[in-house]
Image (spheres, rainbow, N blue to C red):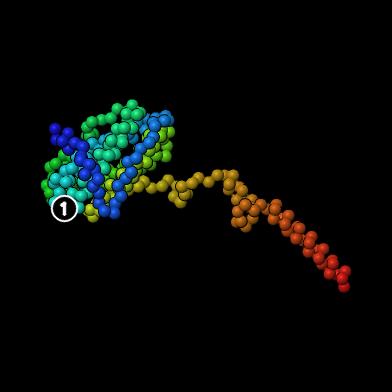
Amino acid sequence: MVLTFLLTPISPARADSTIPGIPVPSTSFNAKGAGSVSPADRDFVIKVRLAGLWEIPASNMAQEKSDDPRIVNIGKSISAQHVLLDQLDRDVAKKLDIELPNQPNGDQQYWLSEMRAANSTTFDEIYIDRLRAAHGKIFPAIATIRASTRNDAVRQLAQQANQFVMTHMTLLESSGIVDYGALPTAAAPTTPGSGPVPVDGQMVAAAHSSTSGIPGVNTTVVLLVLAVALVAGVITTMRIFRAR
């Protein structure tokens, strides 16, 4: 099977390959698998596996089919790093008893078929655009899992997957041929300008009770200070008149 050949683990020399100026993500892992595992966590672990099942063969094809040394180096780095991420993912799946797929899904198989059918002239753009779009879709999903999971192994996997995705998007963009106009646009905010942090109603009330925009200063305190100053002024004035 062609897929089996393309998924063959790479040698240590290739695993160390990278492009100068673009860091290789960390692969240290010490999580124990403690904490509950949600359906979203399980889906995330499966999606990380699926990413490797098509991006590794796609990136191996980049090394074989592209005539551009930049694309060859990008393919070498992404393939090598996905092998490492795939191993991390399989380790987490084993800890958490999550069954992983061994074949790419339908969309991924179609993208691979596109690349296999492409010649050296058309391959580069297909490879770069397909992988850049895929990384852009998984990026927010990683953030959601990282912020919400109760399981330490899933949390650490999300943390490291985020590093890999950031590195891979940077690698793909370094090709200079990403079609940014074809990327999906972000959804419009439902309440523009409201800011990311909700405002507590009690905080608003406290702000209104404070004086002249000075945070932490209560109106009662200010009035008390003014009264003391007024009394002191009266006493001083009386002493001046008596002295005359």
Q: Is residue 51 visible?
A: no
**Residue position marked by numbered label 1 in the rendering:** 68
For the point 25% across and 39% down, which residue is it? 83
Taking 90 as reference, is 59 left or right?
left
Name the image quarter holding the C terminus. bottom right
Residue type (three-letter) at the residue carrying disc 1: Asp
* Label 1: how many Cα within 10 Å (few below 14, some 14–19, many 20+): some
Front-most of residues 182 and 129: 129
Residue shown at 31%/32% (left/top)? 91
**Quarter of the rendering occupied by the N terminus:** top left
- Tell me which residue sits at (58%, 47%) in the image: 203
* Residue 30 visible from this viewpoint: yes
The answer to which image quadrant residue 108 occupies is top left
Q: Point out residue 22 in the picture as x, y percentages from the top left corner.
A: 29, 51
Q: Is residue 101 above or below residue 144?
A: above
Which residue is at the front of the view, 232 or 77?
Answer: 77
